[in-house]
Structures are given as C-alpha cells and as structure tokens.
C-alpha cells in the first residue's frame, strides 16, 4: 500500500492497512457540499493483483530516469525493471510482458538488437526507443517484428502507458493469428488424411445399400486409427473391410490409411482374400513406427448372388446380422490380428445371409464404452439390444441398418450411456440387401 498523503486521518489509514491491504491511495479530490463548504475525500483503487512487468533496456541514465518518471506520471499497474546491456536482459525476459528497447546500446546497435531480443524472447511485446535523428529506424523495427516505436523526448506518460498496453495486445493478436494459421494448416492436413481414411464405397450393385459413420475418440482428435472400405471386384464379388490400428493419434491414422489403400489396390487387382490379408500384414510391418503396433481386421466377401459369403476375422469383433425376426452375431473362427499373426493365414468361414438381410460392421470402440458410472462395458449383447430398440418391434426392417441417421443414433446412444465422449475411435458400416 502506498504512503498515505498528508491530511488523511491516521485512524483511517491504519484501518485501511488492516482490512484492505491491497488498496492503493491515489489522489485527493474536493467534494463540495451544498452550503459552499468542502470536505476532503480520497479516491481509492484496488492495486492490481498482477502488475505488468516491463523491462527497460537502456544504458543512458537520463533517458532511463525519464521513462521512470513518465510511467510514474501515468499511474500504477506497471512494474519496471531496467538493465543497461542486452546481454544482461536474459534472466528477466521469461517473466517480461513488454520490453522497451533502446536501439543504441553499447553491446548491440540498431535492428541487430531487436533481432537478438526476439530470438531470446519471442513471447514478449517490444517497443523500440529511437532518437529524433533516427526515427526512420522505428518504422524499420516494426517491419522487423517490433510492436511499436517511440521517439525519445516526444512522448508523455499517458502515451507511453498506452503504447505499452497496445504493444501487448498486438503481441497477443499476432500470436493468435499464428495459432489460427497453424490450426488452418492442421485442418487442411487432417481433411486430406480424412479423405484417405473415409473413402467412398466402390459399388455398382443396386441391390445393396450402404451407410457409414466415423467418429474419432476423445474431444480434440479429428482422426483415429480405425479404417474401413467397400469394393465391388470385377468378378462380381463385393468385399467389405473394417479395421482398427491399436492406439490413437496421427501415426495410427496414417497407418490405417496405408492399410486401407493397400487392401483396395490388391482387391481391385484381383488377388485372393487370403493373399490380400497377408500383403496387408506385410505393409503394416513395413510402415509401423513401433514394434508393438498391430491392427484388428474384419473382411466380409459377398458372393455375386448376395445370399451368402465368406467372413475372415483377424482379432476383430464379428458383424451383426439383422433379419426380419432377429439380430444376431455372425460366428467365425478367431484368428490373431495383423501384425501378431506369424503364419499370415486367416481362414475364411462361410456364412449364409438369406434373401433380405443387413449387416452391421463396427470397431470395438462402440462396445467398449461404459454403461453408467460403474465398470460395466456395453459389450456385444448391449449393442444387440440397442439395435433391436432402434429398429422397433419385429418384424424388423433390415434396410434401416444402412441408414446413416440410424448409425449416428447408435453412436449417440453409446456416448450417452458412457456419460460423455468415447475414448476410443468408432467406425460403422451398415450394409443391406434390398
């Protein structure tokens, strides 16, 4: 608390110090009464909880004294520190919000001083101080990265205070613009990666309907390690892929894109499903950034008549089959995930679907969400219950499973049961025969 000016009652001063230690006594004003008399009063202002730390780098004692007087004239709110050399500023820069920099220092001259300072304290706002004869340097300094400049001897206390505040706001604005630009570039990269991760199905068969949904786990990620694809081969077979790279983040997402593109390329080239999965595993081992990375994969190949097919599971949850009277899980032998299968073989299992059916292929993020606040997980049976509820009472309409709105509804319901965002990524494919 500042010293009390003369005339303030001592008892009031002691009371203020005891009960309001952060009050700062500013100046006396006269409050006029109606009878022409006046009573002394005092304007009180709360001292700033965090004063702005300003560092003055100035070797001239006279100029430094002038800056101190100008800031004192402008009022409180600024804590001024001074050094004579740029070399002495290093230890004070991390906690400094604004730097007043003389461009004529003994150890550095002109714009070189500014460049060295910006290298040491890129977060600080900088106001350069110039003489009348080299005022042009001020404009050059702003172009070089300073927030503003002042000419010595041509500034008032209020102007200096205002320039410091303006420089700090401009520094924040510049930082915000850089962060925004970085976010835009990141969003563009994510969009390009997302287009690779979320492909358009290659399907000409009008008897089949397809819907897809994808949601990355967590609140901030746009992409995850789940991937899917659907391709109609030249021989009439339709191959459906869904998979999950173990882990979260850009590396897993990039690996998922590699695996999906490799799978689509090999399928379109006419390779057999077993050979395709073996090649995908080889791609995974070549592209993985960590030895422990692996991927669970489900591949369903539908024969041209669309009444049956072959299911291959590499450590992945089995699809759900929806018919008019039931929702069940398609059974198939369990095999190790890609990356953990030393034999490189995933035997196919024949499945019968019938005349009118729908399949729900999904990644395990959909069933690993919690149910309520306990430790119970949704699981496959819980998901089957949600699908039945979404379709209504039997007979079910399997065609609704490929409706993207229903797929989104399932994800939202699982999220609600989890009491918030799911930690794991979720991918869904709804495929049905009309």
Image (spheres, rainbow, N blue to C red):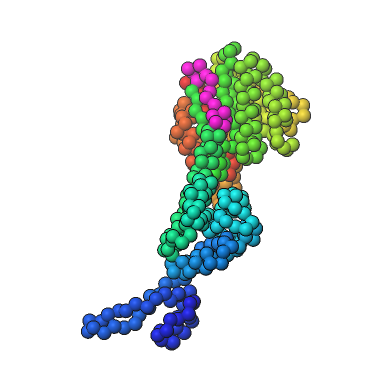
- Residue 393 in sight in this render: no
Picture residue at 55% right of the left edge, 15% below the top: 305
- Along the viewing direction, whichever of 249 and 134 lies nearer the viewer: 134
Left or right, 100 with reference to 33: right
Q: Residue furthest top?
A: 235
Q: Is residue 278 above or below residue 156?
A: above
Left or right, 23 with reference to 256: left
- Along the viewing direction, whichever of 47 and 233 lies nearer the viewer: 47
**Residues shaded magenta:** 192-208
Picture residue at 53% right of the left edge, 23% below the top: 201
- Asked whether 108 falls inside the magenta stretch, the response is no
- Along the viewing direction, whichever of 60 and 6 lies nearer the viewer: 60
Q: Position of residue 24 (x, y in %)?
A: 45, 74
Left or right, 234 with reference to 272: left
Q: Position of residue 289 (x, y in %)?
A: 70, 36
Picture residue at 43% right of the left edge, 76% below the top: 25
Picture residue at 70% right of the left edge, 20% below the top: 275
Q: Position of residue 369 (x, y in %)?
A: 57, 44
Corner quadrant of residue 377: top right
- Residue 240 in sight in this render: yes
- Asked whether 200 falls inside the magenta stretch, the response is yes
Left or right, 172 with reference to 117: left
Q: Position of residue 337 (x, y in %)?
A: 70, 32
Q: Residue furthest front?
A: 133
Q: Please tell me how many numbered marks the rendered image carries.
A: 0
Q: Residue furthest right?
A: 342
- Along the viewing direction, whichever of 267 and 67 lies nearer the viewer: 67
């Amino acid at each position: 608390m500042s010293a009390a000016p003369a005339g303030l009652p001592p008892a009031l001063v002691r009371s203020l110090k005891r009960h309001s230690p952060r009050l700062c006594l500013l100046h006396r004003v006269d409050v006029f009464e109606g009878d022409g008399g006046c009573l002394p009063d005092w304007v009180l202002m709360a001292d700033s909880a965090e004063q702005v730390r300003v560092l003055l780098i100035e070797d001239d004692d006279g100029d430094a004294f002038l800056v101190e007087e100008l800031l004192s004239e402008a009022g409180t709110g600024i804590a001024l520190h001074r050094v004579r050399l740029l070399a002495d500023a290093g230890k004070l820069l991390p906690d400094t919000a604004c730097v007043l920099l003389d461009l004529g220092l003994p150890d550095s001259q002109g714009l070189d001083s500014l460049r060295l300072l910006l290298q040491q304290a890129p977060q600080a706002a900088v106001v350069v101080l110039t003489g009348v004869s080299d005022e042009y340097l001020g404009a050059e300094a702003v172009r070089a990265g300073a927030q503003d400049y002042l000419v010595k001897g041509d500034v008032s206390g209020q102007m200096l205070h205002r320039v410091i505040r303006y420089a700090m706001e401009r520094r924040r604005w510049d930082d915000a613009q850089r962060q925004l630009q970085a976010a835009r570039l990141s969003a563009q990269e994510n969009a390009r990666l997302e287009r690779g991760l979320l492909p358009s199905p290659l399907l000409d068969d009008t008897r089949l309907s397809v819907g897809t949904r994808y949601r990355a786990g967590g609140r901030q990620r746009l992409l995850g390690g789940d991937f899917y694809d659907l391709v109609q081969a030249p021989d009439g077979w339709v191959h459906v892929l869904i998979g999950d790279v173990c882990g979260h983040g850009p590396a897993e997402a990039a690996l998922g894109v590699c695996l999906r593109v490799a799978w689509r390329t090999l399928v379109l080239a006419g390779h057999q499903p077993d050979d395709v999965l073996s090649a995908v595993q080889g791609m995974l081992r070549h592209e993985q950034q960590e030895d422990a990375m692996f991927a669970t994969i489900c591949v369903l190949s539908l024969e041209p008549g669309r009444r049956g097919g072959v299911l291959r599971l590499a450590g992945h949850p089995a699809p759900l089959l929806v018919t008019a009277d039931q929702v069940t899980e398609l059974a198939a032998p369990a095999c190790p995930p890609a990356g953990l299968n030393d034999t490189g073989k995933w035997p196919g299992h024949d499945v019968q679907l019938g005349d009118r059916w729908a399949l729900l292929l999904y990644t395990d993020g959909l069933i690993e969400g919690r149910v309520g606040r306990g430790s119970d997980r949704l699981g496959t049976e819980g998901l089957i219950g949600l699908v039945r509820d979404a379709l209504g009472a039997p007979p079910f309409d399997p065609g609704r499973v490929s409706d993207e709105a229903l797929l989104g509804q399932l994800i939202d319901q699982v999220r609600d049961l989890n009491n918030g965002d799911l930690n794991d990524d979720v991918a869904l494919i709804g495929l049905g025969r009309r």
